[in-house]
Each structure stands twice: as structure tokens, then as C-alpha cells.
């Protein structure tokens, strides 16, 4: 008999394993509700973009509702993306120590059941998206192309983190699409900077699996960079800060936004200094720390938008 109470190896001591009904636990694990960090990281570019666009518009009236809808959308679509990833990677996951306890390879749900759950999440995400203008709806739907191909990239390129960056940074476009019904140059620069940031932090994350990945033939920037990861991380984090800086300049952001970017840069610098690629628990902690880095930047952007609107 399948044990629905058995936790995922890298997500112990969480609310799903403690409080959720047994029947719901496999589905909540598919959606990564036991690991909220991915939702935070998907949400960050949305928050940045919305705050920056509100500053450009000199209008904060739609910002609170937009942020709430973005939060709900990030929660649902991150879950959908992870469910799709687990469906496509179920055979690979069974071969990796960290992932073999996920619901599908562990036999807690079938691939067909997971597909039905995926459809329900996508419908919920569509319901959130339809609250926005039609330009934003079209922009959001376009992201599904990147999301759909991402799980297959690790099989053919050492740069799946770049494709993840394209998907996880899409929110950098959505804030402008929702608030201004257009995509300015500032949004494109913000998108590019976020992609560089994602490549950096997901390389740190991928160092947890390098031995298993090498054995089963899965590719990643962690394997590509190897012992040179610190130098590559410094390059991508520097690019992230520089490109986001161009976005702020293009949007006419003020001092407080720049202070937020400086705090963001300081946090990224601390990750570079502390990184030890052979220390998996440390890699996980540094990866998770990017939520706080993103919130520092968001704080600067939203306070700057308030100042610009009231001045």
C-alpha cells in the first residue's frame, strides 16, 4: 500500500507533512507547496516590474490589487510548472537520490492523475490572468511556450538554467503589461537582468545534484562551470545588477530605487563570497537567500514609486 505520509527527501518538517490531509499531500508536493521558495523567486520579477511600472505611471491605485493577483498567479503557475516538470522527468527523478521520493516516482500519484491536476492548476492560472487587460493576457499566455520546453533542456544543453531564466523572469514583463498595457525598454532591461540573476542562483541550486546528474547524463551550468562556478556566479550576478540598473535609469527611477539595487547587489556579493560548491546544505541556504535579495530590491522600488507619486 502506498504511503502518502512519506515526505520528499529535501522538504522535511513542513506544513504539508504535518497538517494536510493524507490524500492531498501528494498533490501539494507536486505543486511544491511544501517548498515555497520557488513561488517567491517566480514572484520577485513580477513585484519589481509592477512597482517600477507604477512609478513610471505616477499612479499607485492599481498596484495593491495587481500585487495580490501576481502572488496568487505565481503560487498557481509555479505549482503547474513543477507538476509538468515532474511528469516529464519522472524516469530521471527515480534515478536521483534527492528526487526519487517525489510523488510520481514514489508511486503516490500516477502520471495521468498528475496531468489532471496540472490542467486544474492551468485553469486556475487562466482565471487569474483574465483579470488583466488583453495585452497582459496575451503576454502571459506566451510564457507557456518557454515553460513547456524547459524540462527537456537539461537533456540537450548545459544551459537549462538560461531557459529557466526566460521562464522565471517573465514577470518582469508582466508588471508593465498589466499597469501600462505595453512593454517599455525598462521592462526588457529588467527581464534581461532577472535572467542573469536566475542563471546565477539556479547554478547554486544545481550543485546539490552534480554527482547524480553526471551519472545519468543530465546537463547543467553547475556541471559546466565546475570549480570555476564562483567566477561565473560573479559574472552573472554583476550582469544582473548592471542590467537592472539600466532598467532603473530607463524608467527614471529615483534614489530609493538605487538604494534597493545596492542592497540587492550586496546580498548577491555575500553569496559569492560564502559559496562552497561541495557543501550541499550551504548551497541550498544560499539559493533560498535570494528571496531576501529580491525583497530588498522590491522595497526600494515600491518606496521610490510612492515618493514619485506623492511628489
Image (cartoon, helix red, strand yellow):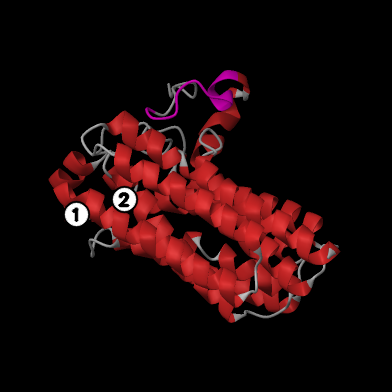
Vertical arrangement, residue 124 with respect to residue 91, above or below = below
**For this rendering, which residue is in front, 5 or 16?**
16
Residue that mark 1 sits on? 225
Residue identifier under label 2 = 203
| Picture quarter with the N terminus | top left
Classify mark 1: residues with Cα within 10 Å, few (<14), some (14-19) or many (20+).
some
Q: Is disc 1 placed on a helix, strand or loop?
A: helix
- Residue 162 occupies which quadrant of the picture? bottom left
Asked if residue 98 lies left or right of residue 69, the reply is left
Residues in magenta?
9-18
Is residue 17 on the magenta stretch? yes
Which comes sooner in the sequence, label 1 or label 2?
Answer: 2
Please name the residue shown 44% across and 66% down the image: 242
Pointer 1 and pointer 2: residues touching (CB < 8 Å)? Answer: yes
In the depicted structure, whether residue 136 falls above or below residue 65:
below
Q: Is residue 256 left or right of residue 307?
A: left
C-alpha separation, residue under disc 1 versus residue under disc 2: 9 Å
Q: Is residue 23 above or below residue 211?
A: above
Amino acid at each position: 500500500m502506498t504511503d502518502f505520509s512519506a515526505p520528499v527527501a529535501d522538504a522535511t518538517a513542513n506544513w504539508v507533512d504535518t497538517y494536510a490531509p493524507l490524500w492531498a499531500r501528494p498533490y501539494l508536493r507536486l505543486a511544491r507547496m511544501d517548498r515555497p521558495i520557488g513561488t517567491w523567486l517566480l514572484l520577485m520579477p513580477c513585484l519589481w516590474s509592477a512597482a517600477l511600472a507604477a512609478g513610471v505611471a505616477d499612479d499607485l491605485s492599481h498596484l495593491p490589487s495587481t500585487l495580490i493577483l501576481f502572488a496568487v498567479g505565481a503560487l498557481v503557475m509555479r505549482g503547474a510548472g513543477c507538476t509538468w516538470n515532474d511528469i516529464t522527468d519522472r524516469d530521471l527523478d527515480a534515478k536521483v537520490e534527492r528526487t526519487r521520493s517525489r510523488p510520481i516516482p514514489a508511486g503516490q500519484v500516477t502520471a495521468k492523475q498528475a496531468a489532471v491536476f496540472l490542467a486544474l492548476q492551468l485553469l486556475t492560472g487562466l482565471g487569474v490572468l483574465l483579470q488583466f487587460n488583453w495585452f497582459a493576457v496575451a503576454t502571459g499566455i506566451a510564457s507557456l511556450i518557454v515553460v513547456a520546453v524547459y524540462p527537456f533542456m537539461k537533456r540537450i544543453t548545459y544551459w537549462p538554467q538560461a531557459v529557466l531564466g526566460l521562464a522565471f523572469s517573465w514577470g518582469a514583463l508582466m508588471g508593465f503589461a498589466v499597469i501600462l498595457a505595453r512593454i517599455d525598454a525598462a521592462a526588457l532591461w529588467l527581464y534581461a537582468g532577472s535572467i542573469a540573476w536566475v542563471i546565477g542562483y539556479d547554478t547554486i541550486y544545481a550543485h546539490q545534484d552534480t554527482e547524480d546528474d553526471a551519472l545519468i547524463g543530465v546537463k547543467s551550468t553547475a556541471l559546466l562551470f565546475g570549480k570555476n562556478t564562483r567566477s561565473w556566479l560573479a559574472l552573472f550576478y554583476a550582469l544582473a545588477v548592471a542590467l537592472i540598473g539600466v532598467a532603473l535609469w530607463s524608467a527614471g527611477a529615483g534614489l530609493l530605487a538605487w538604494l534597493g539595487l545596492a542592497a540587492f547587489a550586496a546580498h548577491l556579493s555575500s553569496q559569492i563570497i560564502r559559496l562552497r560548491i561541495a557543501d550541499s546544505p550551504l548551497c541550498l541556504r544560499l539559493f533560498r537567500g535570494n528571496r531576501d535579495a529580491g525583497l530588498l530590491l522590491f522595497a526600494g522600488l515600491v518606496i521610490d514609486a510612492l515618493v514619485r507619486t506623492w511628489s
